[in-house]
Amino acid sequence: MQAIETIEVDSPKVACDGGKGPLGHPRVFLNMGDKGAVECPYCSRNYVLKAGAKVSGGH
């Protein structure tokens, strides 16, 4: 079994496509909201907001 990947990001909004080119999954856009983390429903990658990252209230 492959370990679930955790990726630190600078924005609470991320896009995930599985990272495996044509063998990945459809690109999905995920929003962490106020949780500071989100899991991709396709590949279970965990995206975590980096400590000190600025969260803007804009688009």
Image (cartoon, helix red, strand yellow):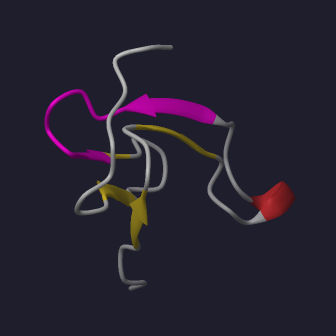
Numbered-mark total: 0
On the rendered image, what quadrant is the N terminus found in? bottom left
> Compared with residue 2, is residue 46 higher up or lower down, i.e. above or below?
above
Give the extent of the magenta segment: 28-38
x and y, in percent, of residue 3 in the image: 36, 83
Report the residue that reaches farthest toward the left: 35
Residue occupying the point 41% across, 46% down: 40
Q: Quadrant of residue 13?
A: top left
Q: Nearer the viewer, residue 23 or 57?
A: 57
Q: Quadrant of residue 9?
A: bottom left
Residue occupying the point 25% across, 58% down: 52
x and y, in percent, of residue 44 in the image: 38, 56
Q: Is residue 26 left or right of residue 53?
A: right
Q: Nearer the viewer, residue 42 or 59?
A: 59
Q: Quadrant of residue 29?
A: top right
Q: Is residue 49 left or right of residue 9?
A: left
x and y, in percent, of residue 16 in the image: 58, 46
x and y, in percent, of residue 51 in the image: 23, 63
Q: Nearer the viewer, residue 54 or 4?
A: 54
